Amino acid sequence: MRSSAIPDHQPAGGWGKGSYVTRSHLQLLKKAIRQGWDIPEDVKQAIVESLKECMNSGKNRLAIRAAEVVIELDRQGLLPDDD
């Protein structure tokens, strides 16, 4: 019998801590950037941090896709300044 109790943890979802990023997520993000979707500054910061992790993951395909997203962010002038 399953318990109806709410678990102590909630899935992060989106670009929150602990969320798992796939190449498909990155492709959708790249498309959203190209189409001019509004990305709040705090979400943009989380995305850039996730992209850095992807590029350093040791997974070549994921790293390449993440680099493509960084390039698109830069093309659109959306890459946040490193302060």
Image (cartoon, rainbow, N blue to C red):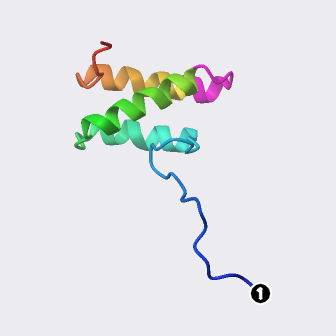
Q: Is residue 14 magenta?
A: no
In the drawing, does residue 10 fall left or right of residue 38?
right
The residue positioned farthest toward the bottom in the image shown: 1
Q: Quadrant of residue 35?
A: top left
Q: Residues within 10 Å of mark 1 (few under 14, many from 20)?
A: few
- The residue at which mark 1 appears reads as 1
Looking at the rendered structure, the secondary structure element under dot 1 is loop
Q: Quadrant of the N terminus?
A: bottom right
Q: Which residues are magenta?
A: 56-64
* Residue 70 vertical position relative to residue 26 in the rendered view, above or below: above
Q: Residue at x 32, y 25 (%)?
A: 73
Foreground: 27 or 8?
A: 8
Q: Residue at x 28, y 16 (%)?
A: 81
- Residue 68 position, x and y percent, is 45, 24
Q: Residue at x 25, y 26 (%)?
A: 78
Q: Quadrant of the C terminus?
A: top left
In the drawing, does residue 71 fall left or right of residue 18?
left
Foreground: 59 or 48?
A: 48
- Residue 50 position, x and y percent, is 49, 31
The residue positioned farthest toward the top in the image shown: 83
* Residue 34 vertical position relative to residue 72 in the rendered view, above or below: below
Q: Is residue 63 magenta?
A: yes
Badge 1 amino acid? Met
- Residue 74 position, x and y percent, is 30, 19
